[in-house]
C-alpha cells in the first residue's frame, strides 16, 4: 500500500534514475547492458518534459509530455507494476492536465502503440479520453499528430477547455 504519492517535474539530475526505471520495465537487469542510458534520457530533456511519481523516494511512474500550439502531447507513459498502479497513473495524469490548463492548452493528445491493448484503451477512457480519427481533429490538433507521425490514423484525446483559440494569443 502506498503512503503518499508525490508528483513532480523531473530534473536533469533524475536522468540516471529515469533510465534505470525504463530499463527495469523493459526487463533489463542491473548487470546487463542498458538499453536506455543517462545520456539518452538527458537528450530527451531537450525535446520533452518529464513528470515522475514517487512514494518514499521510489519512482513509480513516468510521464513525458510536450506543449506546443495549445496542444499537450503525451509521448511517454510508464507505470511500475504495483497494486496501486491505476492510482499512480491517475495522479500523474491529473498533474499533467492541471499544468496543461495553466498553459492554456485546449487538449491533450495521447500517442498510443500502433495496436494498443483493449486494457490500455479502457484505462484512458476511464480518465475521460476518447479515440478520435486524425481527420476529425481541429486543424492545430491534426498538425500536432501529423508532425509526430504522418501515418497515424487515430489518437486518444481529452479536451481541457471548451472554446478553441481562433487567433494567436
Image: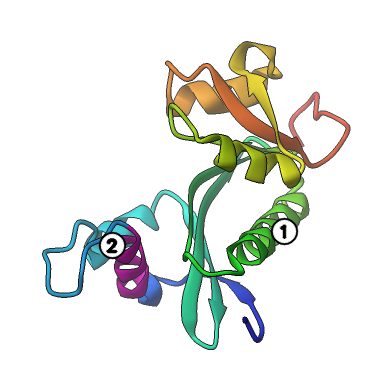
In this orientation, which residue lies closer to the viewer: 167 or 154? Answer: 154
Image coordinates for residue 102, horizontal then vertical, percent: 76, 55
In reply to whether residue 24 is colored magenta, the answer given is: yes
In reply to whether residue 6 is colored magenta, the answer given is: no
- Mark on residue 94? 1
Q: Secondary structure beneath disc 2?
A: helix
In this orientation, which residue lies closer to the viewer: 99 or 168? Answer: 99
Picture residue at 74% right of the left edge, 45% below the top: 126
Give yes or no for contact between labels 2 and 1 (Cβ–Cβ under 8 Å).
no
Image coordinates for residue 120, horizontal then vertical, percent: 56, 42
Image coordinates for residue 141, horizontal then vertical, percent: 64, 26
- Quadrant housing the C terminus: top right
Magenta segment: 15-25
- Quadrant housing the N terminus: bottom right
Q: What is the distance, in whole Å, between disc 2 and disc 1 at their CAs?
A: 25 Å
In which quarter of the view is residue 7 placed?
A: bottom right
Give neighbour class at mark 2: few <14, some 14-19, many 20+ (Cα, 10 Å).
some
Image coordinates for residue 30, horizontal then vertical, percent: 19, 74
Picture residue at 36% right of the left edge, 68% below the top: 21
Q: How many marks?
A: 2
- Mark on residue 23? 2
Picture residue at 60% right of the left edge, 17% below the top: 134
Q: Of callouts 2 and 1, which one flags the residue occurring earlier in the amino acid sequence?
A: 2
Picture residue at 45% right of the left edge, 27% below the top: 115
- Mark on residue 17? none
Is 53 displayed left or right of 114 in the figure? right
Give neighbour class at mark 1: few <14, some 14-19, many 20+ (Cα, 10 Å).
some
**Helix, strand or loop: magenta stretch:** helix
Amino acid at each position: 500500500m502506498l503512503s503518499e504519492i508525490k508528483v513532480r517535474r523531473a530534473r536533469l539530475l533524475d536522468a540516471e534514475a529515469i533510465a534505470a526505471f525504463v530499463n527495469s520495465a523493459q526487463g533489463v537487469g542491473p548487470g546487463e547492458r542498458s538499453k536506455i542510458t543517462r545520456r539518452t534520457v538527458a537528450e530527451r530533456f531537450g525535446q520533452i518534459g518529464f513528470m515522475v511519481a514517487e512514494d518514499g523516494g521510489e519512482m513509480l511512474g513516468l510521464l513525458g509530455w510536450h506543449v506546443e500550439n495549445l496542444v499537450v502531447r503525451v509521448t511517454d507513459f510508464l507505470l511500475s507494476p504495483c497494486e496501486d498502479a491505476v492510482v499512480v497513473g491517475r495522479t500523474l495524469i491529473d498533474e499533467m492536465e492541471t499544468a496543461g490548463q495553466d498553459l492554456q492548452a485546449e487538449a491533450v493528445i495521447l500517442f498510443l502503440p500502433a495496436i494498443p491493448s483493449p486494457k490500455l484503451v479502457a484505462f484512458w477512457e476511464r480518465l475521460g479520453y476518447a479515440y478520435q480519427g486524425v481527420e476529425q481533429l481541429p486543424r492545430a490538433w491534426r498538425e500536432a499528430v501529423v508532425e509526430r507521425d504522418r501515418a497515424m490514423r487515430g489518437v486518444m484525446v481529452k479536451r481541457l477547455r471548451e472554446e478553441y483559440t481562433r487567433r494567436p494569443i
